[in-house]
Image (spheres, helix red, strand yellow):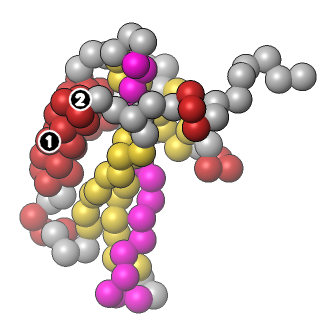
Amino acid sequence: MCLLPTLTREHIMALPELIRRTAEKLLTRFCAQRVPSLERGQLGFSFKVREDSITLFEERLDPSDPVQFCLSPVAQFRFNHDLQQWTLHYPGSNNRWHFYLNVAPSLDLGKLLQHLEQDPLNQFWD
């Protein structure tokens, strides 16, 4: 028996335009600043906006094909429309995302990005 309703396409809303643009600006800056200058061209970061979530990816050169990059999910930010708050999630097994309990939901995506950068529980970075 399923206790939680299954989310269908009609339950998921796109990010409001201003919130999406603000988030894209913050994440673009975060991705650019995260790469050490010595690793540029071999390491990078990108993100993808999908409905009410944004997934952050690490891009590394594929060792078997040096012109291809491998994408690895690092974190996901989800926006709650009712509360107007962001939550932080980390990748787990079986391509599932897990709610990161070490930081509360926040109105400020920048706060979650700072927590991601610090990563006190080593959930996001190797």
97 magenta-colored: no
Q: Which amino acid does label 1 sit on?
A: Lys
> As displayed, is residue 101 above or below residue 37?
above
Up-down relation of residue 109 to residue 95 (above or below): above
State the SS at label 2: helix
Front residue of 74 and 18: 18
Image quadrant where residue 37 sits: bottom left
- The 10 Å Cα crowd at callout 1, few under 14, some 14 to 19, many 20 or more, is few
In the picture of the structure, the residue carrying the numbered disc 2 is 19
Q: Residue at x 44, y 59 (%)?
A: 72
Which residue: 32% across, 52% down?
47
Q: Give the residue at x 45% y 87%.
A: 64
- Earlier sequence position, callout 2 versus callout 1: 2
Q: Mark 1 points at which residue?
A: 25
User: Mark 2 against mark 1, which lies toward the viewer?
Assistant: 2
Quadrant housing residue 80: top left
Camera-side residue of 107 and 113: 107
Dot 2 amino acid type:
Ile
- Magenta-highlighted residues: 65-81
Left or right of 125, for residue 94: right
